[in-house]
Amino acid sequence: MVWLGLALSSAPVSPVLAQTAGSAAQGGGLSVAPVQLTLAEGTRSTSTIVSNPGNGPVTVQVRLFSWTMADDEEVYTPATDAGFSPPLFRLEAGGAQAVRVVAKAPAGPVERSYRLVIDQLPLAGAPGQLQLPVRMILPVFIAPAAGVARSQQLEWNARQDSKTNQVTISVRNRGPVHAKFVELAVHDGGKSVVIAPGLAGYALAGQERSWTYTPTTPTKTLALTVQESGKLLRASVLLTQ
């Protein structure tokens, strides 16, 4: 897994903003729109606009990584089948810059997923001044080739630990495109309990995502609800041990 440390620091830095569900985002001295990029069928490039709404200049670094999941951790590796530009630029106050992502390989049978990492680098020569790193991490998707069905095939499972009573809910996406989940809830004790508020995460094409929670009442079947691409999904899942 690649730690996304700032270029001027060897220490890992946690994202200030990652996995936003909106159409635009702002963090520190940067504003970015749109916050999700998709190269549709037949499209070789797309772009996002990075703006500086602040009162002073900023330096911005951009990187692109292939994105997969392993044990619910995001795994980043340098992208070889997609490119981007520019990698480094300066934005004056009120300025804007387009960051372009380009497909370098033909579309395949499965959607390809990436993370575009945009860092506002610390200003040089500011001794004694606290500078918080600003990072935005955008999802980027390259659609599968023509003729491939654009639908997810979601398989839900739930397993309960007999010792801790904790339940692990998992979903495997056997389809060729990603699923984006918002507001995952279970029906527990006659009421809806949200276990992943807001953006609950992604199940990338051919990959798995899971969540954990501890139920308050015994049950053999879990009733789940979640928003996926603006649609309300319902699932009834047999609880196993």
Image: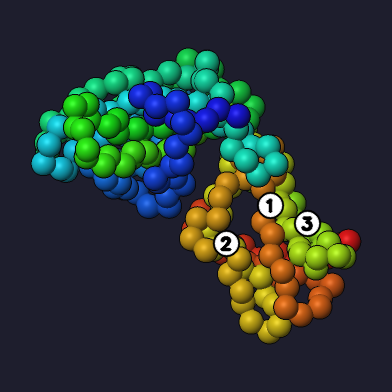
Q: Say which of marks 1 and 3 sits in front.
A: 1
Q: Earlier in the sequence, mark 3 or mark 2?
A: 3
Amino acid carrying mark 1 in the image? Ser
Which quarter of the image is occupied by the N terminus? top right
Instruction: Answer above or below: position of 45 versus 40.
Output: above
Residue that label 3 marks: 157
State the image quarter where residue 200 is shown: bottom right
Nearest the camera: 23 or 126? 126
For residue 223, above or below residue 136: below
Where does label 2 land, which residue?
Answer: 196
Residue drawn 64% across and 82% down?
Answer: 191
Name the residue beneath numbered marker 1.
210
Q: Which three-letter amino acid code belongs to the residue tagged 3?
A: Asn
Please, what secondary structure does the residue beneath circle 1 have?
strand
Of the residues tagged 3 and 2, which is closer to the observer?
A: 2
Q: How crowded is mark 3: few (under 14 residues within 10 Å), some or many (20 or more)?
A: some
Instruction: Pick whichever of labels 2 and 1 is earlier in the sequence.
Output: 2
| Nearer to us in this view, 39 or 206 | 206
In front: 5, or 192?
Answer: 5
Local crowd size for mark 1, using a 10 Å CA cut-off: few (<14), some (14–19), many (≥20): some
Mark 3 and mark 2: span between their CA atoms? 16 Å
> How far from the left and from the top, in percent, is residue 168?
74, 58
The residue at 34%/32% (across/down) is 119
